[in-house]
Image: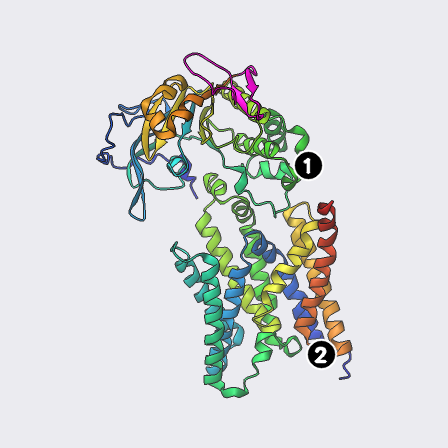
Amino acid sequence: MQDPLHERRPLPLAAPADEDCGHPHHHGGTPGPRRANALIGARGLSFKHNGRSILQAIDLDIHRGEIVTLIGPNGAGKTTLVRTLIGLLKPTEGELWRAADLVIGYAPQRFDLDKTIPMTVARFVAMGSATATPGDIDQALKEVGASKLDDRQISELSGGELQRVILARALVRKPQLLVLDEPVRGVDYTGEAELYTLIGALRTQHDLGVLLVSHDLHVVMAQSDRVVCVNRHICCSGVPETVAQHPEYARLFGAQAARAFGLYHHHHDHRHDLAGEPQPAHRGGLRSLPEA
Amino acid sequence: METSIGEPFVMRALLAGLGLALIAAPLGCFVMWRRMAYYGETVAQSGLIGIALGLGFALNLTGSVLVVTLAVSGLLLLLSRQEIVPLDSLLGILAHAALALGVIVASLVRGPQVDLMAFLFGDIFAVTIVDLRWVLFGGIGSLIALMVIWRPLLALSVHEDLAAAEGVPVDRVKLIFMIILALVVAIAIKIVGVLLTVAFLIIPAAAARPLSETPEQMAFFAAIFGMLSVAMGLFVSISIDTPGGPSIVLVLTILFLSSILPTVLRHRR
């Protein structure tokens, strides 16, 4: 069967759903005509399930070498958007296209993996690509810093280790686009910092496009070129600093979340509050939460 | 009852049991990994309708059971698309409805003299040459089909969305798996009965899990456990005159408990 991810699938462009959000905002992540060099792009993408609208008029492009972070509260349709973009769901309306021969490396949430199947890490990574050689598998594990895990059982890994191994499976496909669904969820702060550093390094080394999904609003990867804030439609988007100050962002996540919006930076410039909760340090126009 | 091991009906029972254990082992691993034990139970219990219809119209029982298990698989596929009633409730409803319908149809077509016990718990010592032929050809067919879809089925059992994103034709592979399962259940019912069929699928797989480091190892150990239990269960059955199928299932359960116990104790500390 032809890989559905590799075919260009233009869909008839429909008029965006006309729902009044009651406030001025633009719907576009990157509005305007399709850009030729985008790895993946959507215009006016809508998705309905059982007659209920999940996504409305989404415009989004992801380019090579670009990290786009998708944030939004639970139930905002982030996962639906990702599933639509990688071809698991058919959009109800709108246009979706992918670069010719685009290979996507998808890293789903590690919580959904079945651990009752006995399987070594190397085997799990190998499943990502039918053509992967043992050398490719070693290389992918090495890139995520998990070389030593190759003969361990998937069921024995810690959360952070498993996340790296999932990332290695995405990399073994030699993708141009990485799609990572909440890679740092449930990982401790140090692990989170390391994962973000790793993702940033992979982007640079392979000139990858990266789509990162996050529901953790407190720390958004500073290397994000764009943060796209989704709540069924695209509420606002821009460089991380802009989004944090956007009134839509504050409205969606509450003023406190907006204040707490922080950025993870390469250097470990965080501190811990009295409760042991890591707090991103003060930076630019952003304020961190007052000491507890 | 004085029975010699060498008697033909004992040999037929042994061959059928060993063959079934071999076929059921890899399939049972997937039933366990994909959490389809209740699904298998529902399909197996629907087999009683097939038995009753087969008796009524004087058809080959395994054949008529296969038609019903396939039909029920299709019905389950259709009903699972709604989201108002959860899947386990749906399976519970259909399993019991199938059992009720099977008992009623059996009483209608043959009158009360139909030996329901033999079909509920199987009568492994009543296995015929025709049944053995089903085990042989059905078994070879299902094992080959399973080998063909092994890699994609394994991928979607680990993570369905990930497999789909990597290009696995998820719906087609799942459909083929359901057909193989319906076939193996139909073959098993004549030997171990509608109520013990799923035990043959999942207990060997569960017993093999703690010893296994790869999916293939688990299928291999499951086959060893299954065949060992058949031999031991039949021996016990003949020695102390207990029913065949239930004896095998009890041996399987003892093997499972001894296999899983060290793991449980290790995690307690």
| Residue identified by numbered label 1 | A151
- Whether residue A272 is in magenta: the answer is yes
For the point 61% across and 47% down, which residue is it? Answer: A117
Note whether B122 is above or below A87 in the view shown: below
B26 left or right of A39 in image: right
| Horizontal and vertical percent position of residue A275 | 57, 26
Foreground residue among A53 and A2: A53
Residue A41 is labelled as none
For the point 58% across and 25% down, which residue is it? Answer: A276
The verdict on a common chain for dots 2 and 1 is: no
Residue A39 visible? The answer is no
Of badges 2 and 1, nearer the viewer stands: 1
User: What's the residue type where badge 1 is placed?
Assistant: Asp
Residue B8 is labelled as 2
Chain letter for mark 2: B
Q: CA distance from mark 2 to mark 1?
A: 48 Å
Residue B104 visible? The answer is yes
* Residues under numbered marks 2 and 1 in contact, where contact means CB atoms less than 8 Å apart: no
| Horizontal and vertical percent position of residue A166 | 56, 34
Q: Residues within 10 Å of mark 2 (few under 14, many from 20)?
A: few
Q: Quadrant of the N terminus of chain A?
A: top left
A219 left or right of B235 in image: left
Range of residues picked out in magenta? A266-292
A36 left or right of B247 in image: left
Q: Residue furthest top?
A: A284
Note whether A275 is above or below B49 in the view shown: above
User: What's the residue type where badge 2 is placed?
Assistant: Pro
Helix, strand or loop at label 2? It is helix
Tally the numbered discs: 2
| Horizontal and vertical percent position of residue A247 | 32, 23
